[in-house]
Amino acid sequence: MSIDGRLSGKVVLVTGAARGIGEHTARLAAARGARLSLVGLEPERLAALAADLGPGHTWHAADVTDQAALAQAVDATVATLGGIDAVVANAGVANRGTIAVGDIEALVRTVEVNLIGVMRTAAATVPALVDRGGYLLLVSSAAAFAALPGMAAYCASKAGVEQFGNAVRLELAHRGVAVGTAHPSWVDTDLVREARTDLPAFETALAKLPWPLRRTTTVPECARAFVRAIERRSRRVYVPRAVGGVQAVRSVLVSPLADRLVGRTARVTVPLIEEQSRALGRGFGVSTPQARS
């Protein structure tokens, strides 16, 4: 794969491709010449996106927590497009509520999709990536570096993705596969917008975070960073780039000092988040497929 922005003829498989970052990453990669395999849980949106991208692209309805479904999607991609050069393990969800007030199944499902889904995606696609000396981009988060009240399962899952990527990078290096982890802060997706709408106290808490953790990035900006990562086979991707500085001081973010500073706000915001989560009556945002099942 070239580093000059051209992905002509390369096959890129993207999970969570029906909307948000996955959709825009697919659109930009296709515009640069890639052939896309779109994987997700919303077949109507996947079909519409594939049609919009034009000939040479394919889509597959699959839950990233279902190994058999992923295997079918990968096999179909290889059969149709000839192989896989890059994978963006992007599918993710974010539950509502805390460990004290919230649906435990929603917390567990968040970890299953965000972390176990990444593991399953990697396992399903590694053979094809080895054949092409490809690239695997695992979508973690800036939340891997900091503990945020009301986001326990999300933070845990994204920290797990980071360490999984660190280990798998070493496991696959001798097979010619490069592995990167992506660490966006808040991105203006349906997931983030709905969290802010569902839980006004969450929006208040975000506003009090230090820069750049309170900055919201546009979806196209994040997609551009992901596509650059594919082109360059990047080890780390920070969106915005200033998040790299947050990573450098991550030990401070989980220190007793951080507990005291964040705790001052948490004593007020957490009860409000819990009250609003209880009143909401659902574990996910309305556009999350799990919320509609």
Image (cartoon, rainbow, N blue to C red):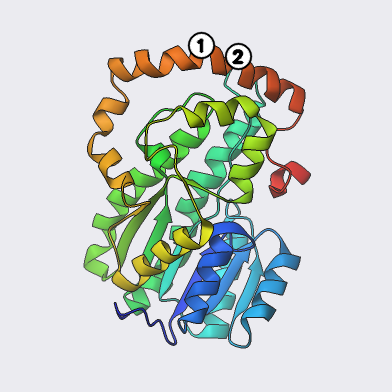
Q: Position of residue 47 (x, y in %)?
A: 71, 73
Residue at coordinates 55% horizontally, 66% vertically from top-left? 24
**Residue tagged by mark 2?**
271
Numbered circles on residues, count: 2
152 or 80, which lies in front?
152
Q: Quadrant of the N terminus?
A: bottom left
Q: Characterize the local packing of mark 2: few (<14), some (14-19) or many (20 or more) Cα atoms within 10 angstroms.
A: some
Residue at coordinates 52% horizontally, 26% vertically from top-left? 205
Marks 2 and 1: CB-CB under 8 Å? yes
Q: Amino acid at mark 2?
A: Pro
Q: Position of residue 260 (x, y in %)?
A: 36, 13
Question: From where the camera sits, is residue 4 visible?
Answer: yes
Q: Quadrant of the C terminus?
A: top right
Q: Amino acid at mark 1?
A: Arg
Q: Vertical placement of 171 versus 232: above or below?
A: above
**Residue tagged by mark 1?**
267
Q: Position of residue 251 (x, y in %)?
A: 25, 29
Residue at coordinates 58% horizontally, 65% vertically from top-left? 23
As drawn, is 151 to the left or to the right of 146?
right
Figure quadrant of residue 285: top right
Figure quadrant of residue 138: bottom left
